[in-house]
Image (cartoon, rainbow, N blue to C red):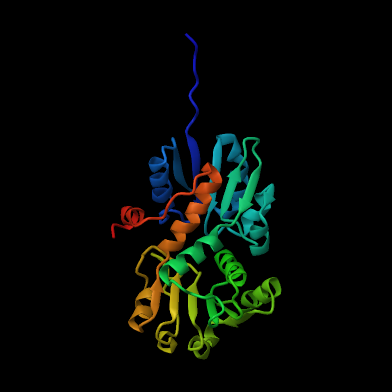
Amino acid sequence: MKDVKSKPPALVGVIGQPIGHSLSPAIHNYWMRRHGIKGYYIPIEIARENLAEAIKALPKMNFRGVNITLPHKESILHSCDSVSDEAALMGAVNTLTISESGRIHGDNTDGFGFLESLTEGRPGWQADAAPILVLGAGGAARGIIHALIAAGAEEIHVANRTREKADSMRSDFGVRVMGHGMDSITKLVAKMGTVINTTSLGMTGKPPVLFPYASLKENTVVLDLVYTPLETEFIQQSRARNCITIDGLGMLLHQAAFSFNHWFNVKPEVTQSLRHSIVGE
């Protein structure tokens, strides 16, 4: 009788620090079960100083790919054998795909996921309808800004605790982007049609976003990328001022769908049943 070797389970996961808050394992394992894919999606906490060495080990452990989250999205570029045009323009990677030969390709699905979530939460939203304010200037912000420009945004304001980092976005993305310090946006907020928090502030265990909520006008679209907790103070305070609020779970689900498609050549659906299984809504 022949010894038939079964195909090993597919290994995928998410790398970050911290990583205990991540909902990505629940999302991807749900889709793997639904599509009959034998494998596991696991959370992996890696410190910055160990990141490059850990990435080199992934092909040897038969990983098919991983997602990258805070604080590694920008530094991971140097560990890729190749990157997509989107990731190169954003200067950040959130998805690694590993070929059978062990080559590591970096991509960024944040922008796609962001726009899907935004238009799902606010049907008919137009990027060029009003100025947009982005809070933060890290890897997630870069993905958002790239997507906003591609969608036709004409005026994007970036506010960051370190003003120089916010200003650098103009050099990287062009004259439609303007930088500000967080202490100088009170008057600016009232002119915004959309406000997006791309920082980790407001996440469980982190301090809240310091924001001039009283300056928000009604019907401003407010999106928070933080999803633990789902109801952040940023969302609650904005809703209290009759803004249209969108939590961070939608973007997480939609960007995850693009990553899943990279690894398994299957585009999974983002459904209410999935959302309910993740957060119990």
x 52%, y 59%: residue: 70
Can the viewer see residue 45 in this picture? no
Q: Residue furthest front?
A: 124
Q: Position of residue 249 (x, y in %)?
A: 41, 62
Choose top left, top right, bottom left or bottom right for residue 142. Answer: bottom right
Can the viewer see residue 196 in this picture? yes
User: Quarter of the image containing the C terminus?
Assistant: bottom left
x 62%, y 60%: residue: 92
Q: Nearer the viewer, residue 240 or 46?
A: 240
Q: Is residue 14 left or right of residue 103?
A: left
x 50%, y 61%: residue: 113
Q: Position of residue 128 (x, y in %)?
A: 57, 79
Q: Position of residue 154 (x, y in %)?
A: 61, 79
Question: Is 56 rendered above or below residue 190?
Answer: above
x 59%, y 82%: residue: 180
Question: Is 40 rendered above or below residue 200?
Answer: above
Choose top left, top right, bottom left or bottom right for residue 205. Answer: bottom left
Q: Position of residue 56 (x, y in %)?
A: 63, 42
